[in-house]
Each structure stands twice: as C-alpha cells, then as structure tokens.
C-alpha cells in the first residue's frame, strides 16, 4: 500500500483542522483520538500511543472483566503505527476533518497479536510464502432507517414523503428516490480511495447493497470495508436518516450480509483457480475443502453478535448449513459462473455486522489450510440446500463461542492472544444479554404463566 506525505496532503486542504486517528477493535468498532491537524507527523511516524486493551473491549466499550491487558499490566499503552493508507477526507462532520488508520504494536516493537488487522496480515504473508496473492472483493448490504422512534422503521422516500412499506428487490424507483444519498456515498468512496461498484436495492424496505471491486491486497479490501461502513453511517445522518449494518434489524425482513469473493493469483499474475472450464482447478477444490472444514469453528467470526443468528435461518437467503456448490445461492460457498478467467469463490456466511479483518482472516486462513493439506471437499450440492440433510452451522451465539474455543484449526489461523481476547469479549457480551429481559417476554409471559 502506497504512503503519502501527510503534511503535503493537508497543505492542499487547509480547511481540515482535525484528524481522527483510529484503530479497529475485535468487534469492528473504530476507537481512537481526535488530533489537531498540525500533529499529523506524530500520527504518521508512530508517535501516538493508546491502551492495548482498547482492541478487546465489548460492544458497549467496556473493559473485559479479568482482562490481563488491564489488570496484570496496569492497562499498558501500545504503540500506534500508521498503516500507510493515505489520510482520507471526512466531510459529514460539522467541520471538514481527516481519518487516519492505525494498527498496534507492543512497547518492545513487536506487532501486537491481538490486533485484527495484524491477524489478517499474518495470513496474507503465509500466502506470499507460497507465491500466491489473494484477490478480494466484498459485497456489503445495509438498511437506511428512520431513527426517530425507539426501534428502527423504514424511512420515508425523499421524493414522495411516503414511508417505504414493501420489499423492493432491484427497484430502480428506490435507487432513484435515494439518489442524493447514494451520490454522496459514491463521492465519499472516490475521495477515500474505495473502489465502489454497482449499487442495488435489496430485498428489504430501505435495504441497499454496494459492491466493492476486487483488489489484490486483502488488507486494503478490509480497510475499504471498514471505512465504507463508517462513511455510509455518517452520510446517512447528514441526510436525516440512519444506516445500520445489523445482521437482522427487522425480524420479518431480509438480513444484511457481507459476501466475500476471492481468487488467488501466482507470481506471474495467473488465476490459479482457472482451469479453462466451469469446475475450476484442484487448488480451488482444496480451498473449498478448507472453508468447509473450518466453517463451524469460524462461525463466531462470521456471526459475532446475538442478533447475527437471526439472519442464519433456513430459507432466509442466508446459509444455515455447511455446504458448497456451483452457481447455487442456497449454499454457504458458491462458485459463480462466467468466464473461467474470473473463476473465484464466493463466501456467503458473514453478516454485515462482522469485523472485515477477521472475516477475511478466517476465510483466507481456512482456504490456505485446505490448500496446504490438499484436503478434498464433499460433493457439491445440487438444488435447494435448505431442503437437504446437511451439517449445520452452530445454531446460536453460545454454541458458536464454544465452537471457536474448541475448534482444532483456530490457532492455526489466529494467535492464542487474539483467540483468548475474542472469547472473553463474546462471553462477557453473552452474559449481559442473558440478564436482559425483553419487552416481548413481558408481553408473552408476565400475566400468562
């Protein structure tokens, strides 16, 4: 990833007074500092410090009980390295600002193994040692919602003023009604170097999907996804809406996913999944086998929250079983058709609520294990996977936490430090959810039992 002279970049944009210098925690939440623009050199030279424990906080921003990063070390700082991605402009705040992406290392200079971006970098480096480079694209779905009530509801059309009340899959009217919002999203993507491609109106009222183009740098692909989610939420607020990447904001409408497409190229730029036919190479089959064999234990990465499991239901346009197939959208791993030169794997499990760095690390890490072990996949599924008896994904959050904890391949993808941090974070969140009684429970049981 190319670096830029931050001082020169800011000199061309004198209106920018502030830089948001941020790291990405295990939940995919950006945490950091607001720094005056005249301290840009401090940010880009690695002079910024933040507690290492920030990376493992729960979804509410609270420390993990018993976290050794807090209590055993006195909540020690780590060093914040500039990732090298150019500063990006932020114009949906009250004043123009800039955004700087950072990742962390320890006081002794070693990369911090609990940083999700470092985890992905380690997987990419292992591919590099095999002479292979992953080429990655993401498809992100989200809902635009009216945030004025206690719970979200579909927004009113900026054109008609009427509230959206039906699913509008591939609706041109819905795209055109939200034209001003979408135009600004595309402008922000261009300004931030995010390769946004096609936008479609998805299956839910106010739901959209924007595809990001393939790049031959998985770290950039994950950076793009993280920044994309942030800019969509910011621009939605600017237009009087809110945007949510919750996996299932409405119980009776489609969920939001983050589909990942990837291929592998060798040192000569050849797609090693392409054998000139529809079926792909043996290497593709090994990669698929790795994804299948590691899918259940990695489900916590793909579905990291309580709400995530409302999306992974049979017949819901999201996968619920461990299966693959050619041109089949009812399975978890799809091999799209089209030109053999573009032969690739589509991974359909992750929700839009997942951390892009961890999602790519789990997908690419699982595929690499299959390639290194020359594993063979089961037979591809023909027809409706939902109607067949297949191995299933963990059915709930607690089962997914246990599968990640006991998974035989997790420590071949992630450091012990990150594994421990992620489990501690998810267990703390689970405990809090189990203590929370919902309004629907009161409605159902209070005077009936």
Image (cartoon, rainbow, N blue to C red):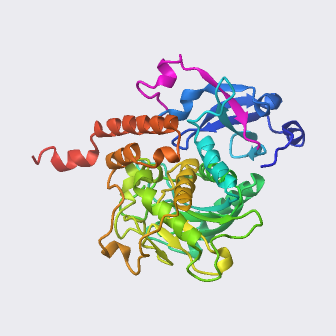
Q: Against 326, is 262 above or below?
A: above
- Please identify the quarter of the rendering in which residue 323 is found: bottom left
Instruction: Tell whether 356 sits left or right of 179.
Output: left
- Camera-side residue: 82 or 255? 82
Specify the farthest residue to the left.
449
Q: Nearer the viewer, residue 253 or 130?
A: 130
Give left or right: position of 138 versus 395. right
Magenta span includes 2:
no
Q: In this orientation, does residue 160 appear?
A: no
Image spot of residue 79 (x, y percent):
68, 27
Q: Is residue 65 magenta?
A: yes
Instruction: Examine the residues drawn in magenta and state their main secondary structure.
Output: loop
Most foreground residue, 178 or 215:
215
Vertical position of residue 78 compared to residue 132: above or below: above
Residue at the spot x=47%, y=27% of the render? 63
Task: Residue lying at the far bottom in this picture: please name it.
Answer: 277
**265 lies above or below 363:** below
Examine the rendering and report whether any part of residue 81 can be seen: yes
Q: Position of residue 49 (x, y in %)?
A: 67, 25
Q: Which residues are magenta?
A: 60-84
Residue name at image x 51 percent, y 47 percent: 412
Q: Residue at x 47, y 77 (%)?
A: 328
**Residue 173 or 284: which is nearer the viewer?**
284
């Amino acid at each position: 990833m190319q670096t830029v002279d931050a001082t020169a970049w800011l000199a061309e944009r004198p209106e920018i007074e502030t830089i948001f210098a941020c790291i990405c925690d295990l939940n995919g939440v950006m945490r950091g500092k607001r720094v005056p623009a005249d301290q840009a050199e401090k940010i880009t030279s690695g002079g910024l410090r933040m507690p290492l424990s920030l990376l493992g906080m729960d979804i509410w921003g609270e420390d993990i009980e018993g976290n050794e990063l807090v209590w055993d070390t006195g909540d020690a700082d780590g060093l914040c390295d500039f990732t090298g991605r150019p500063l990006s402009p932020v114009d949906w705040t009250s004043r123009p600002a800039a955004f700087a992406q950072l990742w962390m290392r320890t006081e002794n200079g070693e990369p911090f193994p609990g940083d999700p971006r470092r985890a992905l970098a380690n997987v990419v480096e292992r591919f590099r040692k095999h002479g292979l480079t992953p080429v990655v694209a993401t498809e992100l779905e989200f809902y635009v919602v009216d945030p004025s009530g206690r719970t979200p509801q579909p927004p009113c059309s900026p054109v008609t003023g009427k509230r959206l009340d039906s699913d509008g899959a591939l609706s041109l009217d819905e795209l055109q009604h939200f034209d001003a919002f979408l135009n600004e999203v595309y402008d922000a993507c261009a300004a931030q170097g995010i390769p946004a491609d096609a936008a479609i109106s998805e299956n839910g009222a106010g739901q959209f999907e924007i595809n990001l183009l393939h790049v031959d740098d998985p770290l950039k692909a994950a950076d793009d996804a993280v920044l994309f989610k942030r800019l969509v939420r910011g621009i939605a607020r600017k237009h009087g809406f809110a945007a949510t990447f919750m996996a299932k904001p409405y119980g009776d409408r489609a969920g939001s996913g983050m589909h990942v497409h990837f291929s592998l190229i060798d040192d000569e730029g050849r797609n090693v999944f392409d054998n000139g036919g529809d079926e792909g190479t043996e290497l593709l089959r090994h990669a698929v086998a790795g994804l299948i064999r590691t899918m259940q234990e990695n489900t916590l990465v793909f579905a990291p929250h309580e709400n995530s499991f409302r999306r992974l239901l049979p017949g819901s346009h999201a996968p619920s079983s461990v299966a693959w197939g050619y041109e089949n959208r009812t399975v978890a791993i799809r091999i799209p058709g089209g030109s053999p030169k573009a032969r690739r794997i589509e991974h359909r499990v992750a929700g839009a609520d997942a951390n892009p760095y961890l999602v790519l690390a789990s997908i690419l890490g699982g595929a690499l294990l299959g390639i290194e072990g020359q594993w063979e996949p089961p037979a591809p599924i023909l027809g409706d996977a939902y109607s067949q008896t297949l191995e299933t994904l963990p059915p709930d959050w607690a089962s997914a936490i246990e599968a990640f904890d006991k998974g035989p391949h997790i420590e071949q993808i992630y450091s012990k430090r990150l594994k421990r941090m992620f489990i501690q974070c998810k267990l703390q969140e689970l405990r809090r959810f189990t203590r929370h009684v919902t309004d629907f429970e009161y409605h159902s049981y209070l005077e009936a039992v």
